[in-house]
Image (spheres, grey):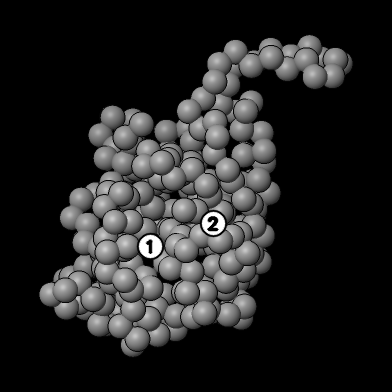
Amino acid sequence: MKTVILCGGYGTRIRDVAENIPKPMSPVGGYPILWHIMKYYAVFGYTEFVLCLGYKSEAIKDFFFNYETHASDFTLKLGVKNSLVRHNSHSEEGWTITMAETGLNAMTGARVKRIEKYIGDDDCFMLTYGDGVGDVDIARLVEFHRSHGKIATLTGVYPPGRFGELVTTDAREVIGFNEKPQVSGGRINGGFFVFDRAFFSYLNDDENLVLEQEPIQHLVADGQLMVFEHDGFWQPMDTSREYNLLNQLYATKQAPWVKW
């Protein structure tokens, strides 16, 4: 099963941290937060990634294209072709990464629609945002998704109250999705989605299509969205304060998402 990661937005709320790079490349402990997200999925055996690129995509492409030199000690002889000798391996060997240009101004729904061809024949795919980490049990998330028979599962978390609140039944079917409520006390959308490929029929190529609006609302109306409840750690990187928090957690070896 492939993991799709949304990496194309402008990230305007964190420009004071990294104005010259896309937000998923903002460093946590010396590596981009995008790398941390991918490492986390890899812990559960999911190492096939599709990156939905847009704003400053060249920074993400360059990082992974030159990853062998970023991640290894090496010796080379200048002026001699094929002289590079790596002195160590890394645990990311075997990752498959598809870099998909999904448009500079496309919204999240359009970006996902535009990578449909890269899902191949898989019956399901995972999706998350390229600017947040958590200690979600991916194995249990996938098991839950396959158990309920609906098209979509999102991970419901308890973060700060500025996000959109979920309304659910006791059976964990989502029956309401309030994008930006005035008062928030319940779970919200934390990303870490699992979708059946039938979800692509809810999407179109209109660059203004926002995943969290019309497509999700239609899933709710059709009774096709379930919530996987996560009570553990979850933290987006939307502000410099959150950037500093994640780096402090990593530096002090208290980062709950670091399981490698």
| Residue found farthest to the left | 170
Identify the element where label 1 is drawn.
Answer: strand
Q: Return the residue at label 1.
A: 193
Identify the element where label 2 is drawn.
Answer: loop
Return the disc, 2 or 1, that comes first in the chain's sequence.
Answer: 2
Residue at image point 68% right, 49% down: 58
Q: Position of residue 63 (x, y in %)?
A: 62, 39
Q: Residues within 10 Å of mark 2 (few under 14, many from 20)?
A: many
Residue 173 in view in this figure:
yes
In the foreground, 141 or 90: 141
In the foreground, 121 or 17: 121
Q: Position of residue 185 (x, y in %)?
A: 16, 71
Q: Position of residue 236 (x, y in %)?
A: 36, 55
User: Which amino acid type is marked by label 2?
Assistant: Cys
**Cα separation between marks 2 and 1:** 15 Å
Q: Return the residue at label 2.
A: 7
- The C terminus lies in which quarter of the figure? top left
Residue at image point 31% right, 41% down: 257
| Residue found farthest to the bottom | 221
Tell whether 131 sits left or right of 54.
left
User: Which amino acid type is marked by label 1?
Assistant: Phe
